[in-house]
Image (cartoon, rainbow, N blue to C red):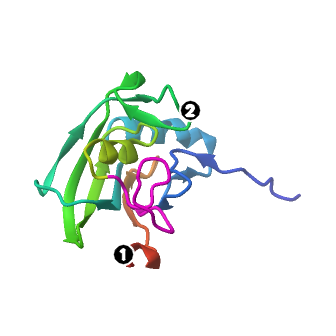
Amino acid sequence: MAKKQLAPYMVHRIDQQTSGAIIIAKNPVVVPILDRLISTKQIARNYLAWVSGEFEQQDGKIELPIGRDPEDKRKRIIAGLNAQSALTTYQVVDQKAGNSLVKLELATGRTHQLRVHLAGIGHPIIGDPLYSSVQNDKMLLHAAELQLILPFEQTKLKINAPIPTYFNNL
């Protein structure tokens, strides 16, 4: 008897233009477990982004509520409709030619959170088609690292997604 083909189950997602790692479950039983691990901050999601401008502070927190943009259904804005609290931490890794490479960690997971937060503080992601006027062939946002606990095994796993070659071609 042939084995039944199982569909993958999305645990979290990244925007279409974002490269990098995502968590996909092979079994629907683990999805709520992984969701809980994300909400209790036992799963860390770290990103890299090239943004416009140079930061005055080399690290910090962006704690601004994010809601729907009443004028564009695709977008979110700071303090928009039905805004929810959102927290992103950042660390400047490099600066060149008036741009900054930042390491970002999601403490919450709002739609477009990194993109909205960075644009909201005046450092939009280079190539972001919705939130930046700085054009590039690709959006320079990469889901670089996931740190998670495997359900049932309780082993810690660190996954690093290779940085695309175009990412450092500023």
User: Residue 158, relative to residue 153: is it above or below?
Assistant: below
User: Residue 168, relative to residue 119: is it above or below?
Assistant: below
Residue 131: in magenta span: yes
**Residue bounds of the magenta highlight:** 124-144
The type of residue carrying mark 1 is Leu
Q: Nearer the viewer, residue 132 or 153?
A: 132
**How many numbered discs sit on the rendered protein?**
2
The local secondary structure at tag 2 comes to: loop
Q: Residue at x 52, y 51 (%)?
A: 15
Q: Nearer the viewer, residue 98 or 155?
A: 98
Q: Residue at x 71, y 50 (%)?
A: 7
The local secondary structure at tag 1 comes to: loop
Tag 1–tag 2 contact (CB < 8 Å):
no
* Residue under numbered circle 1: 170
Q: Residue at x 54, y 42 (%)?
A: 30
* Residue under numbered circle 2: 73
Q: Residue at x 10, y 54 (%)?
A: 57
**Where in the figure is residue 161, as x and y percent of width and height?**
43, 68
**Where in the figure is residue 48, as x and y percent of width and height?**
34, 62
The type of residue carrying mark 2 is Lys
**Where in the figure is residue 55, as x and y percent of width and height?**
16, 56
Prevalent SS, magenta region: loop
Residue 42 visible in the current orientation: no
Quarter of the picture containing the C terminus is bottom left
Left or right: 57 in relation to 78: left
**Where in the figure is residue 9, as x and y percent of width and height?**
62, 46
Q: CA distance from mark 1 to mark 2?
A: 31 Å
Question: How packed is label 2: few (under 14 Cα within 10 Å), some, or many (20 or more)?
Answer: few
Q: Which mark is residue 111?
A: none
Quarter of the picture containing the N terminus is bottom right
